[in-house]
Image (cartoon, rainbow, N blue to C red):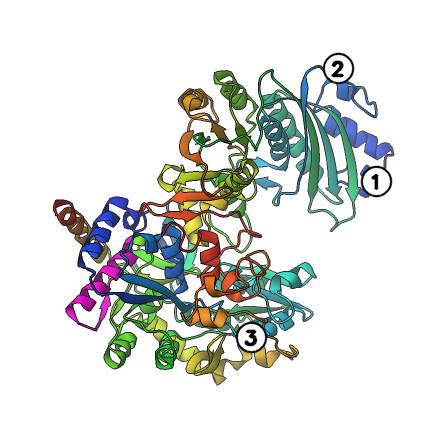
């Protein structure tokens, strides 16, 4: 359970944000993530941001995958 | 799409699959608890690319599938009430209750609206002040705080015709019940991703500590599942059992404190019935006294008539991982997505639906 | 003229005649329609294709089109899927009492422009007006006649093992564009419906190679349902590759948001062609030279094993079944 997708926060007003993903925009609620800032990526579930996505961790994870792919290619 | 497409790259998947094949020596059975993980696994054919040492079984993490027939009957009875608008997530529409479904009631003239968010349900309440809008609260810890927030927003905006039928459930208690039943021997657990976004990774520690089962919290893209399996295999081969987070971009060990606060403020746990599993202590959420004015069960006189369970339906066994859809004599004969008998076939996350739509172990 | 359509407009009396003359005949001007006979009478020789359809889309105006354009494109495309060149259409309107006159005028205008683009004439029609609540603003019914050129034999049962499967462009555009207007699922997008008449595209394809085996437009139920229909009719299996299927990023994003699979989302300006492997490149080239086929791509091939099934190779290299759409596409949260 829990379809949540990463969206970019474009603007914030009161406890709501205008977000964008792949060219689609929608208004969502920040009630669960008061720390959200414009420019953050948020994970959105049923119209609410449930988390601010950690971009460094995302990049780190992809780097890890790339290392594994290289190592497996060699062996 | 950023943070989605990168986690579907086939060349990176090859590397992870190759590593898993190289490292996995011990035969194991892993369970993915969450229905969203079940969908990813079937949609991308993950079972096919894993080595024969790894057997995968799906768990009861489909909140629609585990909604008790009696609760569904309540929702259907409410939909038949005059001046009521039922607002619901799309997942619930086709699930058969004892006698009917929300979809059938809609065809009979009941006002049932599919919404993407409780924000939409609140808007419907504001736009229809002479009707009562009842939102069907289904879901785990990911969804519960959003319903809590909607209640507080209704308070703030003075919306007096908004109600919740709370059928929310909590994951850790049912996993404990499953493990205690000893029905399925598990060697690893793929922990739900977005439930963990809310509750963090600490609530899963009892699984590693008390049952010696490795746990890894996974994301929902195919590379996430492969990484999770890779980390479970690593623990198994090292003889470890601990809780790790693979989904580090989406989960912090402490979870989302604000969301947890909202759940705590609006809801309280109580024992509730899980379809196919029975009553599990402290596994449901109901509205606290202070928010009783939003409770649909108190505001409306619901008389849903006796509950009937469909004969020969083994959804319960499938939900507990004891049987697979292929074991069910109704599967794809009397029970199909067009004419579902049980919820596992209706819900887009149910095991039976995934088996049917994506071909089960086709090609594997 | 009244500013809203009334029941009287459908009664056959003076108001009805006024509506037909001023709104329909004037806009759709052609000699057969202007005769005002009860039937249109035409001469033919050759193999005829004949189709009928009803259009009940809501909302009746959506990004990139409206129910009028949809009606013409849908009918022309049905005929084109038999390899036919569309000639004549009938057009029936069932109007809900209270529909604003200027909305009707816009629809008729759209019908006229689309008919002109497609090179068809609307030669006969009918108008009815029903009580409020008995029709969702406007329903349109059409029938269409076309001629099939010599030597062309297109049928859903002709797919053969070894054939290539060609898709004319991106999938999911129409369904998502319409959904974006639906209450309760509100999101903003630049996406427009791909609603388009494909008669000329098909003519070019047939000219490049008359040996095309199957043609079908993946409307309701999406690409997945259409491929399943063809697989069953031809008693073959169709293998497609996920990475070869063109999808716009916005469609992918909306599908992610709502929990849809683009394979099941409706299209109104695309076609699937199943062609002998040796002709595939020729046909593809001809498609890409046409305005509505620039994004055409080979997405798979026909096999003999597992007849009636559609199998997709995922980005992980694994295979999974693609079934038909069951019921309605419903947004999911899980």
Mark 2 or 1, closer to the camera: 2
Label 3 packing within 10 angstroms: few (<14), some (14-19), many (20+): some
Residue C332 visible to an observer of this rendering? yes
* The quarter of the displayed image where residue C282 is located: top left
Numbered circle sitting on residue C43: 2
Left or right, A52 with reference to B21: right
Residue behind mark 3: B71
Left or right, C144 with reference to B63: right
x and y percent of residue A53 in the render?
28, 58
Assign a secondary structure to mark 3: helix
x and y percent of residue C206 in the render?
52, 19
Magenta stretch secondary structure, dominant: helix
* The quarter of the displayed image where residue B340 is located: bottom right
Numbered circle sitting on residue C186: none
Residue behind mark 1: C8
Query: In terms of sequence position, does the residue under pointer 2 or pointer 1 come before the other?
Result: 1
x and y percent of residue C288 in the render?
42, 23
C-alpha span from label 2 to label 1: 36 Å
Assign a secondary structure to mark 1: helix
Callouts 2 and 3 close, C-beta under 8 Å: no
What is the chain letter for disc 2?
C
Same chain for the residues under marks 3 and 1 in the image: no
Question: Which stretch is magenta?
Answer: B223-247
Left or right, A65 with reference to C325: left
């Amino acid at each position: 359970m829990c379809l949540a997708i990463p969206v970019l926060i474009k603007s914030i007003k009161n406890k709501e944000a205008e977000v964008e993903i792949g060219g689609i925009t929608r208004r969502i609620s920040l009630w669960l993530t008061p720390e959200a800032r414009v420019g953050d990526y948020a994970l959105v579930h049923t119209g609410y941001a449930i988390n601010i996505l950690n971009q460094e961790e995302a990049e780190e994870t992809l780097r890890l995958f790339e290392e594994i792919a290289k190592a497996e290619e060699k062996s | 799409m950023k943070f989605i497409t990168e986690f579907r790259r086939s060349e990176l998947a090859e590397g992870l699959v190759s590593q898993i094949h190289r490292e996995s020596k011990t035969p194991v059975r892993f369970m993915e608890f969450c229905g969203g993980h079940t969908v990813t696994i079937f949609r991308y054919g993950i079972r096919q690319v894993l080595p024969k040492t790894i057997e995968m079984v799906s768990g009861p993490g489909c909140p629609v599938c585990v909604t008790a027939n009696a609760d569904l009957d309540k929702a259907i009875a409410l939909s038949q009430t005059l001046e009521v608008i039922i607002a619901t997530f799309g997942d619930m529409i086709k699930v058969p209750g004892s006698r009917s479904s929300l979809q059938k009631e809609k065809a009979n003239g009941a006002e049932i609206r599919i919404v993407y968010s409780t924000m939409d349900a609140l808007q419907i309440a504001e736009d229809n002040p002479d009707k009562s809008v009842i939102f069907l609260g289904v879901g785990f810890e990911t969804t519960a705080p959003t319903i809590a927030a909607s209640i507080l927003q209704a308070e703030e905006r003075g919306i007096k015709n908004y109600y919740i039928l709370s059928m929310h459930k909590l994951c850790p208690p049912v996993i404990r019940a499953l493990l205690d039943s000893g029905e399925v021997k598990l060697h690893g657990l793929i922990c739900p991703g977005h439930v963990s976004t809310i509750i963090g990774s600490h609530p899963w520690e009892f699984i590693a500590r008390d049952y010696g089962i490795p746990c890894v919290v996974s994301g929902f893209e195919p590379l996430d599942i492969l990484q999770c399996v890779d980390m479970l295999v690593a623990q198994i081969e090292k003889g470890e059992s601990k809780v790790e987070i693979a989904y580090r971009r989406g989960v912090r060990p402490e979870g989302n404190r604000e969301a947890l606060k909202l759940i705590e403020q609006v809801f309280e746990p109580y024992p509730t019935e899980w379809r196919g599993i029975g009553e599990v202590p402290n596994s449901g959420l109901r509205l606290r006294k202070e928010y009783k004015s939003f409770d649909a069960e108190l505001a409306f006189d619901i008389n849903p008539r006796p509950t009937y369970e469909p004969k020969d339906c083994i959804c319960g066994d499938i939900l507990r991982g004891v049987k697979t859809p292929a074991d069910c004599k109704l599967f794809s004969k009397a029970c199909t997505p067009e004419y579902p008998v049980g919820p596992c076939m209706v819900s887009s996350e149910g095991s039976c639906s995934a088996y049917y739509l994506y071909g089960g172990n086709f090609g594997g | 003229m009244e500013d809203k359509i009334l029941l009287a407009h459908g009664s056959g009396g003076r108001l009805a005649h006024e509506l037909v003359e001023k709104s329909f005949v004037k806009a759709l001007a052609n000699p057969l329609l202007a005769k005002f006979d009860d039937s249109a009478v035409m001469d033919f020789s050759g193999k005829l294709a004949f189709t009928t359809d009803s259009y009940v889309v809501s909302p009746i105006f959506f990004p990139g089109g409206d129910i009028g354009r949809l009606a013409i494109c849908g009918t022309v495309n049905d005929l084109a899927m038999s390899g036919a060149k569309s000639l004549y259409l009938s057009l029936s309107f069932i109007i809900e009492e209270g529909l604003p006159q200027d909305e009707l005028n816009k629809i008729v205008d759209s019908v006229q422009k689309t008919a002109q683009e497609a090179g068809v004439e609307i030669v006969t029609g009918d108008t009815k007006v029903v009580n409020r609540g008995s029709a969702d603003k406007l329903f349109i019914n059409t029938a269409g006649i076309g001629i099939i050129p010599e030597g062309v034999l297109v049928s859903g049962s002709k797919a053969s093992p070894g054939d290539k499967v060609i898709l004319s462009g991106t999938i999911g555009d129409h369904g998502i564009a319409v959904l974006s207007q639906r209450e309760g699922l509100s999101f903003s997008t630049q996406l427009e419906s791909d609603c388009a008449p494909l008669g000329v595209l098909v003519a070019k394809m047939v000219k490049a190679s008359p040996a095309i085996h199957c043609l079908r437009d993946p409307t309701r139920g999406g690409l997945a349902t259409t491929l399943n229909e063809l697989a069953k009719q031809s008693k073959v299996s169709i293998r497609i590759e996920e990475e070869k299927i063109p999808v716009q990023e916005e469609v992918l994003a909306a599908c992610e948001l709502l929990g849809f699979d683009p394979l099941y989302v409706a299209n109104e300006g695309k076609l699937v062609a199943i062609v002998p492997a040796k002709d595939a490149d020729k046909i593809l080239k001809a498609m890409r030279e046409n305005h509505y086929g620039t994004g055409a791509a080979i997405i798979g091939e026909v096999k003999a094993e597992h007849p009636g099934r559609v199998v997709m190779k995922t980005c992980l290299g694994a295979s999974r079944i693609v079934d038909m759409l069951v019921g309605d596409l419903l947004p999911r949260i899980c």
